[in-house]
Image (cartoon, helix red, strand yellow):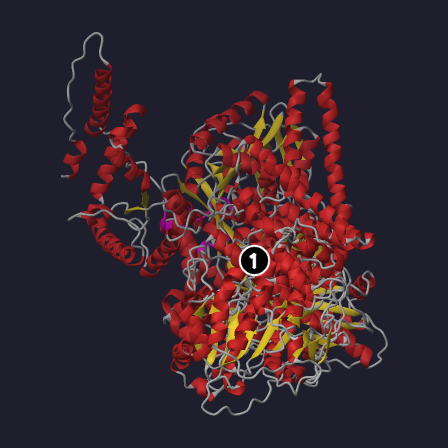
Amino acid sequence: DFITSILKGFPTSAINIGKYPTRDQVHKLKKVRAENLINRLRKQPNPALLSLLHRRLQRMQTTSRTVKQRILRCEKMRALIEKHVPSIKMPRGASSSHHLYWLFPIITPHPDDISKKMNNLGYDIPRGTSQLRCVTSFLDDDEKDECPNTTKMMRDVLYVPIASLGMRNAEMEQLVSTLATVSNMTFNFDISNKRKRSKPRLPYNIISVLMLALVVDSCALQILPTSVVLRQVLPGMLCFLLALLLALHILRVTIGKYYLKCSKSFARLCTIMKGASSADKIDEYVPPALINSGAELIDGFGNHMQEYELCKHDVLRLPAVGDFGVRKRQVLLAGSTGFIGSLLLRELLMNRSKLGIEGGVVVICRSKRNQNATERVKALLARSLFAFMSDEEKETLVTVVEGDVSCPRLGMLKEDFQRLVADMDISHVINSAACVNFTEPLENAAESNITSALQLQSLTKKLKDKDAKYVYLSTAFVHGNKKGSKENPLPETLFDFKQYDPLELYKSMMESQSYASSAMQDLGFPNTYTFTKSICEHLLMKDKEVETTIIRPSIVGPAVETPFEGWAGEKPSTLVAGACLYLKSPCNIWAFGKERAAVIPVDVVCRFVISKTFETSKESENYLIPGKDGHSTPCDSDQFSQESYRSSEESYIFPSENRNDLHTEKEKVPRIVQKFCCQSIHNAVWNSSSPPSTGFLWYDYACAIVQLASARGHVDKVLAYMVLLFSFKFFLAMDLSLKTFRKVHRIVVHGPILLVTAFCQFLGLRPKFLSRLDRLSPFLDLPVLFFPFTMATYHFDSSLHAPLQFNAERYMFSTILAAESFVNRMNERLSKINERRNSWENIKTEDADSCNSTVVAGKNYNMKTSDLWWSLTQPNGNYAIRVIGWIVIKILRSISTEVTIDVESFSQVAKAKEAMENKRVGEDEERKELFVVLAPTHRSLLDFIILSFIAFSNPELGLDIPNIAAADDFSRIPILGFFAKLAGAFFLARGKKGIDPSLQKKVQSLKKSHGTSYPTCFEVFLEGKRSRDRRFVKPKTGFLRCLMNTGGNHLIVPITVNYEAIPEQSDLTTEANGRSRSKLALPPLFSWLRNVRSGKINIGKIHVSASIPISLRSSDKIDINSVAKTVQQLQIRNVVVSHFHIKAGASILEVDSEIVEDSLRLLGSKLWSSIRNDNDKRRIGPLLPTSLSERWVIFLHYGHLYAQFLVNSHPPWAAWLNDCGFKKNEPSLALNANISLIVNLLKCQFDKADSTVKDTLSWLKQKGFSSPTQSHIMQYIREEECEVPALLLHQAISTCLALNSLSDTNDSEIAIQPLFQKSKHSESTPISFGGLTLPEESFGAWGYKDSRFVVNIDDDGSKIVTMKGDRYTISGRPMPKLISFLEDESELHVDPLKISLSSTPSVTIPDSDLTIHGLNVLLSILDNDRSRVSTGAIERTRHGTGHSQDDMYMIRNDSLSQLRLPDVVVYPQQESEVEELVSLAAKESWCIIPFGGGTNVCHATWCPPKTQDPRLMVSLDTRLMNKILAINVEDLTLHVQAGITGGDLVQEMQSRGFTIGHEPDSIEFSTLGGWIATKASGMKQNKYGNIEQIVKEVRVVSSAGKLWQHNQGNGASFERVSTGTDLCSLMVGSEGSLGIITSALIRIWPIPQIKEYDSVVFHTFDDGLRFVKDVSKLGALKPASVRLLDNTQFRLGQALKSKDTFVGSVKRKCMKTVVNLFAEKFDPNIMVCTTITFEGFDVEVKSQMSQIKALAAKHGGLCTGSEIGKAGYDMTYAIAYIRDFAMTYGYLAESFETFVPWSKVRIMIIETKKRLRKEHQDRALPGNPIITCRVTQLYDGGVCVYFYFCMNFENVQNPSHVFAEIEVAAREEILSQGGSLSHHHGIGKHRAHMMDRVNSENLKTVFMRLKDSMDPQNIFGARNGSYA
């Protein structure tokens, strides 16, 4: 079926068209062609598709199981999506699910946005595929509307990668959870990194326009180069821009500091922003470590708490009211829906029993805005103000009467009026109704403020209770332009209207108004409100029949106590309204003087009103009666007669037409007794004699508003500066009058608005901002209306004396906050979005355990200006700090949802500073400067900038930008370190013991650089380094001691920085799991920034909170350790937990999140305030990591809370969770089911970790490791088997090993030895023989003494390897990556101070068996030259060993006792001396072992043990036989002694213009004779051949005498002869067993004309292998040397590179960029490299290079130039040094080579590496083995392959033997895979036991017989190779 469906086609429709087809026919033809195209694709699939089909059919059986699993996964995913994301659509129908099994398509409303966001979060959910396309894609554009539904469907489809990926259930659930979050987002806002912008600000727009103009200008200059106008405009525009920036700088410098100094209220009082109930709560916690430490906590709360209580104020106490029996008195209240009225209603109802008004309150209310009176009052009672009443009480105690007090009969129905007068028992009438509109017309103001008051007074007379009292709320500003003085305050009497009659004034207001208007101006009343109130008081006082009380409040502000601090009603009024106007329209101008504000809290007014309302006349002292002249005098009952009073009711309240009704009403309720009642007036304002601290100045109020508005983002900083400049500088200095200010206001404020409005009307436009201006216009004149009050101090006489407990500054700030709350509500109503509007939100939460946050950055932070403008306008910081701030806010917006701070906690710093200053003054202490020290937790590198950013962005908190004490690592990072220094950072050298003088000097200079007004602020991380697992690290105390030593008092502020996810958590967790610490560098930072820019980083939320500061006074004795511990104990209490943390904990414990959350609440944990609102569509939190260890790290953020329950059962684990001190274990908490469940699950996890470690430790001990290290144990724990995260295993290992005694290698105390120090055996001078000097080699290591690798620890702690000397190209260059490479590959730590094997050994060897006689005989042969005969220990050891790892290990381990060494070393110079020495050996029965350079690695120079050969052993060193005997330039041959070293030979030939062509890796020390004896091969064998092709003739001294052929072995050579077996073939590979080669005739070549290098990188080793195989077929075009390095060796070569210079770094990055642009991206962990050397003539080399490039391109390689090729060639000589360098630090390494045919090379390399790893693992060796290989020599039939094997031998018994066993196993694997036993190293004794795998038994017999015939006495008894 599958094949049929692939091959069948759809039927096509034929169409006949004429010669001139119609348009429809053309369209049909195109459609048919499209169908034919599809049919051809289906009928004739290409070979690639058929190949794919064939491969799938072949794999059908093996894939059937995976298909079933895929179907199950898809069904699971379908169910999850249907359950959790119902908005996502999937295919429907009977067989719809079958459509999901291939690509799993889903349809979403926002496919582009969802795909991008999911991709940023790590999920590849593409929007389309190349295999599914709509048919319309084959049609023309004008035909694509034929399938609109299909097109739309294909456009909206997303493909979820569930079918192809083997995702687990947990991963699928995580994917669906993320998909649900992203799908539910509202995409009308920007979910990318681009932030929303609100209204653009003018300064930024100006700069933008100028920059645009500059661009246009520049373009115009290019188009019109001769334009004079443009040439003049450009400089002008540039000058204007510079002038603007300069003006900004001057404004910021001059006004910025003034801005911070003008008010400290914000810093001290921002605690009340979240509500007074929680803000005033004092934390009485005292850290245990603080006790007896000498330090103390400074909270400072008492200085700024509002201790004023209404009930304790005598004047405000409620009067005692008698018992009224069955009467249920009521109070009539007018104006109950207003600001004062609503609170009056609340107080009356709350105190009804005490006031004797059990009948409740009668409320007169009018209909308004489509609501009748009942509905309005019901809405009022529904507010939280009246929550103390039940619904039934509200129904029975509040009687609503609909009416309008300004209308006739109070606007009531006749029935309601009658019921009110006759039926209700009303004892008091309170009139709080008024129209507080300063610009109200006189008639309206009179009607609202006078008529209504008189009507209510008249109503009072008609009430059933004839003693009813009338209370009227007036205003204190009824004295015209009088302000009073402290000596003569404004009295509580009526104002003297002089010649004006109040009654006539009232009449004038209601009629012509001219008389009233002139009187108002003449008497100096500032507005109609105060004028009408003053007149009303006179008219009310004329009526003596009603006891009338007038209350005169001043400016009424928000509540100070009741119902809560800062309550300001439902609408802004008076004082609050002014602040609201500034917050909404900051461009308005104000004038504020340094005058005392006449403000009274609304709850004080209400309590005062109630007190005076229910006060009897006998209790009052302020009762007055009106005199005939209009003045008020004290009341005397006999003074006035009834005739002197004339009721005002009938004369002037209403027009004449309404009087009849009133007379009728009056006649129905006649008064039986006419009496005179006294009146009283009371000023409800603080008495002028109140303490100054109980009031505030208008200036301070305005400054606080400006600071809050700017701090909370309502106002741009520049605008705030301008306000300060004009309102507080210019206007105060000019002493403006009201008239002048009105003119200025009209010009500055109204002028631009009128111009813009007129311009828009002229154009016929009506933009939206005009509508906003229309709504705002009624309030624009508030500054003018407020001017008389804000520019003067009013003094009043009053019975209200403000007590000292009244905190005026706090009250002032609560007023401003009330205004802001109104503005926030207005913004929400306008935007209709429930979201945080800006950086500071007044959050009230019912949970005490929730964290209170204020947003300062992140995606949820809405900045109203550009980031650059914001950073430039901040008042603090130099320009480096501003640039950093600009970058940081962008980064935080990209990576975090929100950055919040606990403002209340930071305000403690300002309070603590003030408290310390007060304490200093109180104790008369010597004046010392105060220094603030911020001590944050250290979890991320972001910590370094978070606090500085907070101080920079929120200067109103009173924190100076701190000087950061950073680790000196930062100073060495280019660019970053420079900016850090400019930003004020200074650097600490971590790990130093004792006092650091340079640090003290730096701290002292910083302390002197700041003034006392801005104390120096430091930021230091007491933990020293970042916590890798979020637990608290043991604090460091060095910097604190330095601070104390440098003098002054200090305030330590513990700060907790809480992260949901930490940016570098993955790396930190890896380090916590035992990996080495990664260095700080720019490339990782740039890589991270690229991820930030692309939106791939999401760390969720950040919350920063401070703890109570700690005081360190220099006069006290301070225990610094206890202080540091105290800091951590305070930090840990501010840890905040989010839902992300809870989910991580729930996942590792496999419980529900609700259980974890419930346990945290019970334990008192602070939770993020949005923890219940985790489904917020705006917020996409970080994803939980898949690593179990990382999830444990997240859990450890709050894991310390459970430590208290593990103290008894698991004390080590309890200390691990929390080492900062435990809380007292509460039994009630321990019994909680959820807490018990989590604690038990933790115990199970810990027990499992302990058990796993113990089992592994026992297994390792069985393997022979008695005391394995921590890393060794960790290596052999199978995490996937034990299911225990590595984090827990490390702690369990530490506990099990008891690290204090059985430590890991990192903590061992080992004597530090200088590297390569000379021992007593190596202090001698180089060996000299009659003017000839041998190379001075190292003893116990490869190479020259002056060339070696050494390690230096850099200032930043990095381990820098350098090669001493100057012999090699890498000499003297620092190599910072070599140790890191070794650590990364082996996964072990290299401690440079810990020497495993000294490189300067002292050896102990047996004495020589050489007798005096033997010595004398030898001397006689060697011309009695004592220097040529040696029995010294060093010489004997060196000649009895080679350079294998066995040899070096035995020397450096001083274990040579197990090895037999030669008894004597001799140095012949002539062939005749060699002949005599062989004869002497035959005579004395000695054994001679030839010695060349001693570079063998196969034990060829080892002496046979005495059990095999007891004869005296003589080592014959041929290196003095190093003379050039003859050169045949014409035949290109050279006759030379065999003892010459390769280095000398090359040098000699180069001086003569020739090369020998043979360059083995050991060329510097190996000899020509050694090359021949071992059958050596060189790097350039491709061109010159191996040693057997180079050597033509040899001369040999054997036991039979001299051996030679053809011209005595020193004449002309023959290219080829047919004379049987030749001597040369016999001696090549003889390994010193047949005789001593004394000289040889070899080929030479002229020095090549050109020598070039190249390198080619390939994607994989297989690509490189195919490349070198093709190169091997080039024949004569093969380059001289071709070496293929596998990835490990290539990276080793990169590690040997020196540290890049800036230019080198740029060059390397450019090259990398070019490579990635023009080639497929190379994976640095897979790619390989081939190094190539070309030699020859110019044409030859060019031809070779051309061939190489072609072959490289064929195999996907990229030529990377000669630099890498040359470096690879040079590395050959250095790599041997690395082996012995690694041995110094516990690593054994060795190389071994083989030849393998092309057909077997790949599988042989794979299997050999696999065998090496298996052998390493089977022996449970520590760390990972380092295995690498390279292909060196190429042949037509195969290659030579070099293997390198390296292992760590820490705690390994007899490691050299173990290494040898592994090497043997590798050799066996090589042989079994078709490789040779050796290619050019030879056999020696090391591999002799494996020769049975090479030679047959008969051949072995032949060789032994040959040996016997040539050396019957076995004088050359080395027993090497085939002659063993």
Locate residue 581, reporting x and y percent.
Answer: 62, 55
Q: Which quadrant does the N terminus fall into? A: top left
Residue for point 44% across, 85% down:
1230
Farthest residue toward the right?
926
Locate residue 5, reporting x and y percent.
Answer: 16, 35
Locate residue 1139, reporting x and y percent.
Answer: 44, 66
Q: Is residue 344 magenta?
A: no
SS for tag 1? helix
Residue of label 1: 823
Type of secondary structure dominating the magenta stretch:
loop
909 and 46: which one is in front? 909
Q: Amino acid at mark 1?
A: Val
Locate residue 1833, reporting x and y percent.
Answer: 49, 38
Image vertical order of residue 1760 relative to residue 956, above or below: above
892 and 352: which one is in front? 352
Residue 1151 is at least partly visible in this image: yes
